């Protein structure tokens, strides 16, 4: 419960950004903001983080603003002409955004490379990456998984935002569950599954995985709800794409204020 | 050229900031590099997209990463990784493709790279190196590693540079002379066919030869401009398709400079006319890149 206020406030900021910009990808950000709080709010200086599902940029931008990595003026310019914060993260703008993403399937190889470099240099820190469950359809997922296992990258922790929805349907109906823990486990990952909206559960899983220095890369499957916190958005594919009108925005704000005590 | 490339790498193999990745290729050429580099020599398996992504991730941690494979495999399959992960972020990742052009001959079109420069040279921060000889390969490697930025290095069949050429910062060239009536601009190991055609040629003192080994060409080197201004006759030679290649780039630059031109011929890869396959020499011949046709074209200027 100690994080409830932050979870609510960041949701309000995400909604505000999307409302002002009249933009979509709201459900995607509400799905993974709690995961990002658990990673970025408690990040060590040697850790790195890549948001591979770049379409959840407003979740990334708001938490980075919260921890002082993105200034308020920049956040206010989201989606506008001349911004450094477009709908998908841009390259070479912020230290806390080491790689531009937006095309799916890039973050895991990049994070794997960071983890490998840390091993080669005997450097401390964990390489974190956040993927969507639909994103694990990409073939690079499996190339990188095998590479990470073969290279014994136990300093790599992969979070999967598993909300069961992807671009044009349910993951179960498209390619099946490509983010299934048993698949990753069979390749050689240590896997754990948690409630992706419970900060304490996410932090617990993260610490548990970090402590396992056994030569195996890690997967934390975070079970989530797309659009979490706004009933009319929850588990609805269309909220991958839709912007809110005034009434919907006010209704969403009211709900967050009430449920998250903020 | 691959053996000389390997020998060059041996010299820098003890540097801690260098990593060599291969897409499961390099038999009978890279064993020495692997032995010297130890854990910094990584076989990434048959997984080129991941290799480039991992390389970009490593480069973000202060390492310089060479990614090696047969040219088409490390260019086309992983183009988005090269563009987004490497080039967007200006990372020191060096993509090295062996057997550019028709280099793999009878292995067939899957193993050829005749559009690689067109595909890569327009990417942000990217510099493509297409050396023609062992000598300019070494200067290209020196420059590439000093530049510490996204690069593509096209390896081919390398021979030694003929004595009438001197190394220049843009490649190599003959000493310009006032009697020149033809400017030849060539790129890559196909230049060896030009060298053969020029061997003992009676008009040698009337020909300026330039080897341009970097793409894209943003401006024409001053020596080349001066030569074209004198001769008004240009022949370009490349083992690459016309679109996005040397000849196209040179013709645009000539026009932008309003240099008067009598005759311009571009010899380039023609793809697969007739849908037939053979050795590198066979494909060069079908494209008019063989010694005999080059000689005939040169003679047509006199």
Image: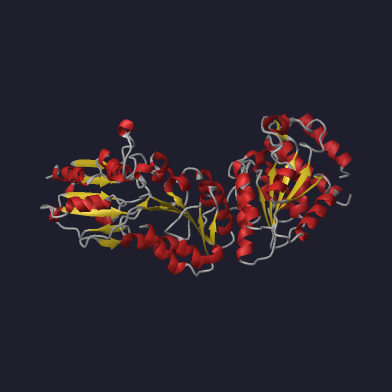
Residue A262, horizontal then vertical, whole percent: 86, 45
Tell me where residue B151 sits by quadrant: bottom left
Residue B147, horizontal then vertical, whole percent: 45, 61
Horizontal arrangement in the rendering, residue B209 relative to residue A62 (left or right)? left
Query: Which residue is found at the position 63% from the left and 43% from the top?
Result: A88
Query: Which residue is found at the position 20% from the left and 52% from the top?
Result: B196
Horizontal arrangement in the rendering, residue B130 relative to residue A201 (left or right)? left
Q: A33 or A204: nearer the eye?
A: A204
Q: B67 or B150: nearer the eye?
A: B67
Q: Is residue B156 above or below residue A238?
A: below
Tell me where residue B200 sits by quadrant: bottom left
Q: How many numbered discs, if any?
A: 0
Residue B42, horizontal then vertical, whole percent: 54, 58
Q: A187 or B291: nearer the eye?
A: A187
Furthest residue to the front?
A: B28
Decide if residue B229 is in sight here. no
Q: A188 or B289: nearer the eye?
A: A188
Question: What quarter of the picture does the N terminus of chain B occupy?
Answer: bottom left
Question: What quarter of the picture does the C terminus of chain B occupy?
Answer: top left
Query: Which residue is found at the position 19% from the left and 58% from the top?
Result: B176
Residue B240, horizontal then vertical, whole percent: 34, 43
Q: Is residue A174 above or below residue B266?
A: above
Horizontal arrangement in the rendering, residue B187 relative to residue A149 (left or right)? left
């Amino acid at each position: 419960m100690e994080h409830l206020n932050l979870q609510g406030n960041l949701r309000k900021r995400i909604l505000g950004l999307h409302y002002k910009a009249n933009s979509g990808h709201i459900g995607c950000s509400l799905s993974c903001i709690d995961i990002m709080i658990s990673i970025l709010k408690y990040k060590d200086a040697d850790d790195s983080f890549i948001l591979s599902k770049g379409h959840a940029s407003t979740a990334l931008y708001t938490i980075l603003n919260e921890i002082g990595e993105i200034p308020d003026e920049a956040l206010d310019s989201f989606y506008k002409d001349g911004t450094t914060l477009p709908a998908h993260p841009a390259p070479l703008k912020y230290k806390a955004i080491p790689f531009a993403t937006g095309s799916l399937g890039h973050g895991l190889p990049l994070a794997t490379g960071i983890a490998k470099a840390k091993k080669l240099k005997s450097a401390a820190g964990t390489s974190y990456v956040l993927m969507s469950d639909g994103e694990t359809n990409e073939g690079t997922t499996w190339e990188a998984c095998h590479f990470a296992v073969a290279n014994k990258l136990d300093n790599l922790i992969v979070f999967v935002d598993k909300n069961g929805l992807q671009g044009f349907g349910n993951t179960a109906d498209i390619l099946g569950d490509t983010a299934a823990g048993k698949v990753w486990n069979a390749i050689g990952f240590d896997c754990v599954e948690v409630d992706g909206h419970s900060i304490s559960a996410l932090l617990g899983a993260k610490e548990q995985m970090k402590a396992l220095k056994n030569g195996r890369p890690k997967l934390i499957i975070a079970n989530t709800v797309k659009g979490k916190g706004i009933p009319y958005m929850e588990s609805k594919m269309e909220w991958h794409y839709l912007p809110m009108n005034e009434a919907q925005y006010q209704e969403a704000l009211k709900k967050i204020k009430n449920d998250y005590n903020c | 050229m691959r053996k000389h490339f390997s020998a060059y790498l041996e010299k820098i193999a003890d540097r801690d900031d260098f990593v060599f990745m291969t897409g499961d290729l390099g038999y009978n050429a890279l064993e020495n590099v692997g032995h010297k580099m130890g854990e910094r020599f990584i076989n990434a398996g048959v997984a080129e997209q991941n290799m480039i992504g991992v390389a970009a991730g490593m480069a973000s941690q202060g390492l310089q990463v060479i990614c090696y494979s047969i040219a088409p495999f490390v260019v086309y399959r992983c183009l988005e990784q090269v563009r987004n992960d490497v080039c967007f972020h200006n990372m020191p990742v060096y993509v090295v493709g062996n057997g550019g052009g028709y280099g793999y001959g009878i292995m067939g079109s899957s193993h050829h790279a005749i559009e690689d420069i067109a595909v890569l040279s327009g990417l942000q921060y990217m510099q493509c190196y297409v050396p023609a000889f062992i000598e300019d390969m070494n200067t290209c490697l020196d420059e590439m590693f000093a530049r510490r930025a996204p690069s593509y290095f096209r390896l081919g069949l390398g021979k030694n540079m003929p004595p009438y050429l001197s190394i220049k910062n843009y490649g190599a060239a003959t000493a310009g002379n006032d009697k020149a009536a033809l400017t030849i601009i060539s790129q890559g190991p196909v230049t060896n066919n030009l060298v053969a055609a020029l061997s003992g040629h009676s008009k040698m003192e009337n020909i300026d030869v330039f080897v341009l080994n970097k793409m894209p060409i943003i401006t024409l080197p001053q020596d080349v401009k001066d030569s074209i201004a004198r001769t008004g006759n240009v022949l370009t030679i490349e083992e690459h398709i016309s679109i996005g290649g040397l000849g196209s780039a040179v013709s645009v630059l000539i026009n932008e400079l309003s240099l008067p031109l009598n005759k311009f011929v571009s010899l380039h890869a023609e793809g697969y006319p007739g849908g037939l396959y053979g050795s590198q020499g066979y494909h060069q011949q079908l494209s008019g890149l063989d010694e005999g046709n080059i000689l005939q074209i040169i003679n047509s200027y006199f």
